[in-house]
Image (spheres, helix red, strand yellow):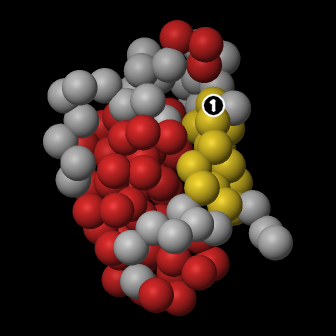
Amino acid sequence: MRFLDLDGVEGKEGFMERCASALSLPEWFGRNWDALADCLGDSGIWPDSAHGLVLVVTGWEAFAGRHPGEWATARAVFVEAMERRRGTDAPLTVALGLG
């Protein structure tokens, strides 16, 4: 299980930096939407997630309110990554934490 807390994050740059640090993304992570989709869609990034990964996103409501365009893109990236890993031995589930 991994946690991505978006509390206090501002804009795309802040979102990418938070993803890089909170998710311990590899050095090659390009801090753009395509690179994030590649990382989340690659079950080899986190060796301990060989049987699947749950990503819990918190603080997303405030981020979405302040940056609706970036949030819409982030959601699309989450969906793309989940679809890429659907039907594999290491599926991805993104859960949006409330409260």
Q: What is the secondary structure assignment of the residue under circle 1? A: strand
Where's residue 22, x and y in %?
Answer: 50, 40
Give the residue at x 37% y 31%.
25
Which quadrant is the N terminus positioned in? top right
Decide which of 99, 50 is in the foreground and name it.
99
Q: Name the residue under label 1.
A: 53
Q: Is residue 86 shown above or below 36?
A: above
Give the residue at x 44% y 30%.
24
Amino acid type of the residue tagged 1 in the rendering: Leu
Q: Is residue 71 shown above or below 55?
A: below
Q: Residues within 10 Å of mark 1 (few under 14, many from 20)?
A: many
Where's residue 87, x and y in %?
Answer: 58, 31
Q: Is residue 95 shown above or below 28?
A: below
Give the residue at x 42% y 47%.
19
Task: Decide if residue 96 is on the left or right side of residue 65.
Answer: right
Q: Is residue 11 shown above or below 53?
A: below
Residue 35 seen in the figure: yes
Task: Decide if residue 34 is on the left or right side of residue 78.
Answer: left
Which quadrant is the C terminus positioned in? bottom right
Give the residue at x 63% y 43%.
3
Task: Decide if residue 4 is on the left or right side of residue 21.
Answer: right
Tell which residue pokes out farthest to the right in this image: 99
Where's residue 17, x and y in %?
Answer: 34, 50
Where's residue 6, x and y in %?
Answer: 54, 62
